[in-house]
């Protein structure tokens, strides 16, 4: 099996979805690599996130915005930042999308925000958290969002948590009760 043509080998594809309860020697005969469904989900989440960042082409350059374009709250605390996530949630509902919102904060400044865009954009990966990560990366002109915190109206799903992990976010805070879910984990 060529390393450049790995996915054309049907034996490898079957190995990706092989029954994890199968004997170890049978799994080894299907695929030389140990790839689980969770690993495949994490890899696809990364691909979706990177695709979103890749969409920033020279055609979008005139649409680039700065974090200074985002209205900032008078006080800088978890309560006001989670309130912004719920404001984004309200916008999602008003626009006819799923009821989720998120904001990305670094050094007390909101650097990205978004509401769910799944229905509006016909994009199954357009979750509020991923859209907010994309917005923040465009605004700061960097895919590395280390030191930032994501505030979400609800607990991020595994896809969004993987995107937060790959973006380098430090913490996830969610819900009306302002629950600190800690740092994002990959395949957690």
Image (spheres, rainbow, N blue to C red):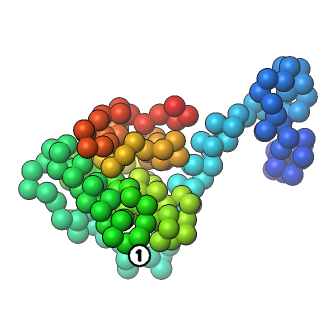
Count of all numbered marks drawn on residues in the image: 1
From this viewpoint, is residue 119 visible? yes
| Rendered residue at 82%/34% (across/down) | 18
- Dividing the picture into quadrants, the one containing residue 187 is top right
Question: 161 or 95, which lies in front?
Answer: 95
Dot 1, crowdedness within 10 Å: few (<14), some or many (≥20)? Answer: few
Location of mark 1 (residue): 61
**Image quadrant where one finds the N terminus:** top right
From this viewpoint, which residue is outermost toward the left?
Answer: 74
| Rendered residue at 48%/44% (across/down) | 157
From this viewpoint, is residue 169 visible? no
| Rendered residue at 43%/44% (across/down) | 156
Reply above or below: 140 against 164: below
Residue 133 in percent (x, y) is at 40, 55
Residue 140 in percent (x, y) is at 33, 59
| Rendered residue at 67%/42% (across/down) | 40
Residue 103 in percent (x, y) is at 30, 54
Q: Please, what secondary structure does the residue beneath circle 1 have?
A: helix
Reply above or below: 158 against 52: above
Reply above or below: 57 against 146: below
The answer to whether residue 29 is left or right of residue 82 is right
Residue 53 in percent (x, y) is at 49, 61
Question: 60 or 72, which lies in front?
Answer: 72
The answer to whether residue 74 is left or right of residue 87 is left
The answer to whether residue 127 is left or right of residue 177 is right
């Amino acid at each position: 099996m060529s390393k450049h043509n790995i996915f054309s080998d049907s034996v490898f594809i079957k190995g990706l979805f092989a029954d994890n309860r199968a004997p170890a020697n049978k799994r080894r005969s299907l695929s030389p690599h140990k790839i689980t469904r969770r690993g495949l989900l994490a890899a696809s989440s990364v691909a979706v996130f990177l695709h979103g960042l890749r969409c920033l082409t020279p055609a979008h350059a005139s649409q680039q915005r700065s974090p200074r374009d985002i209205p900032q709250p008078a006080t800088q605390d978890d309560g006001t930042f989670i309130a912004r996530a719920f404001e984004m949630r309200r916008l999602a509902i008003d626009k006819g999308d799923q009821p989720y919102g998120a904001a990305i904060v670094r050094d007390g400044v909101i650097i990205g925000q978004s509401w769910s865009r799944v229905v509006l954009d016909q994009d199954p990966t357009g979750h509020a958290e991923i859209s907010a990560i994309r917005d923040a990366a465009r605004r700061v002109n960097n895919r590395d969002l280390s030191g930032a915190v994501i505030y979400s109206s609800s607990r991020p799903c595994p896809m969004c948590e993987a995107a937060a992990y790959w973006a380098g976010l430090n913490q996830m805070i969610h819900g009306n009760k302002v629950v600190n879910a800690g740092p994002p984990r990959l395949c957690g």
